[in-house]
Amino acid sequence: MKPKSKKIFQSILSFALGALILYFVFRSTGSDIRENIDAFTSVNPIWLIITCLCYMLTNVSRTYRWQMLLEPLGYKPRWINAFCSIMVGYLANLGIPRSGEVIRGATLTKFEKVPIERGMGTIVVDRILDFVSLFIIIGIGLLLHFNLLVDELSKIISFESLQGKLILGGIALAGLIGFMVVYHLLKKNSQSVFIQKLLKLIDGFKEGLISISKVKNIPLFLFHSFIIWFLYFLMTYLCIKGYEPTSSITMSQSLVVFIFGAFGMIIPTPGGMGSYQFALQKGLSLFGIAGKAGLALGNILFFTIQLFCNILFGVLAVILLPILNRHNKLQPNQA
């Protein structure tokens, strides 16, 4: 299959998966599109505007954090170019899930001449930090609602599936060790042009990964990491309070709902379509919120962020990047 055809197939498949999940969620809750539109319009626009503002501030902090990862490698891209690259990446995720990271790195390479392998290395670090932050939040959630979360997870995760995950983890570890062995053998024994280019790519990627150990201002770096996830949570909490059927949910309960929604975003559908709504309404059901209200809240959050933030600002970024960089010289922007 040709690369372009493969991307089209992946995009269609991800949309089909997201639409299928969304269909079953609508069907299982007995909800319809009109009810969800009414729910959306029932929310005071101020709540939605503040939610969008919180989301865009997370991207501001993410941009600064990314710059801090790139600086030890000798690159200091313009803030606006890094910010727009992130927004273009989010836009790409709506077409082909998980393609946004590659598009983000490629966009920065195009306008800032940061080598793609180094840029991608720092993006991987960025995602690892997100996973670490999520696990910290899960830990807080467990402290606040231990029995509730454990009981629910025990229904979802069987011993066999957990065992399967452990096996997959072992395979991944073995693959990583094998990769390292092959890498050192190639570096030691081969002088071919292709292998040298491949090794250069791997070296650059490795430099990007270890950039976190060279960050100059660790307190500021951790501050941005905290702000990103605090604002993510705040977005969920504000919409919960702004939508009347869910307004009785407390802050600690909102944290549990947020955790469920975060897991829904991991599933490879366009922007979490379907999987996010399903996970969020499951989280709300733990606190007695009906399926219809849970689905409506999921749609309010999902479409507010995707339509008014990722699509709008993603398209603006695509338009603005060539304009903002029309006078730039084609030289690497190094610190």
Image (cartoon, rainbow, N blue to C red):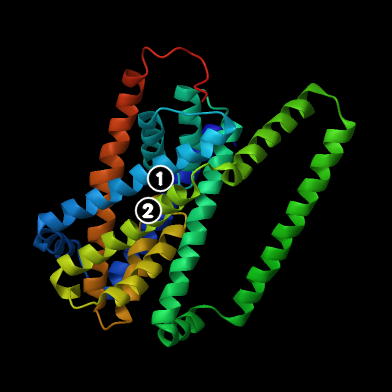
In the rendered image, which quarter is residue 252 located in?
A: bottom left
* Label 2 neighbour load within 10 Å: few <14, some 14-19, many 20+: many
Residue at (20% x, 66% y) in the render: 32
* Label 1 neighbour load within 10 Å: few <14, some 14-19, many 20+: many
| Above or below, comparing residue 139 to residue 194 in the picture | below
Which element type, helix, strand or loop, lies under badge 1?
helix
Asked if one can make out residue 108 in the rendered structure from this viewpoint, the answer is: yes
Marker count (numbered): 2
User: Quarter holding the N terminus?
Assistant: top right
Residue situated in front as seen by the camera: 110 or 53: 53
In the rendered image, which quarter is residue 183 located in?
A: top right
Q: Is residue 66 left or right of residue 230?
A: right
The residue wearing badge 2 is 228
| Above or below, comparing residue 274 to residue 194 in the picture | below
Give the x, y percent position of residue 27. 29, 70
In the rendered image, which quarter is residue 152 located in?
A: bottom left
Question: What amino acid type is highlighted by mark number 2?
Answer: Ile
Give the x, y percent position of residue 184. 83, 41
Residue at (60% x, 39% y) in the render: 208
Specify the label residue 91 is tagged with.
Answer: none
Q: Are marks 2 and 1 in contact (CB under 8 Å)?
A: yes
Give the x, y percent position of residue 182. 82, 43
Residue situated in front as seen by the camera: 257 or 231: 231
Measure how far apart labels 2 and 1 are at the Cα level.
Answer: 7 Å
Give the x, y percent position of residue 33. 19, 61
Q: Is residue 204 left or right of residue 149?
A: right
User: Which mark is first along the chain, 1 or 2?
Assistant: 1
Question: What amino acid type is highlighted by mark number 1?
Answer: Arg
Residue at (29% x, 41% y) in the render: 311
Specify the label residue 62 is tagged with.
Answer: 1
Q: Is residue 54 left or right of residue 61?
A: left
Q: Is residue 23 left or right of residue 105?
A: left
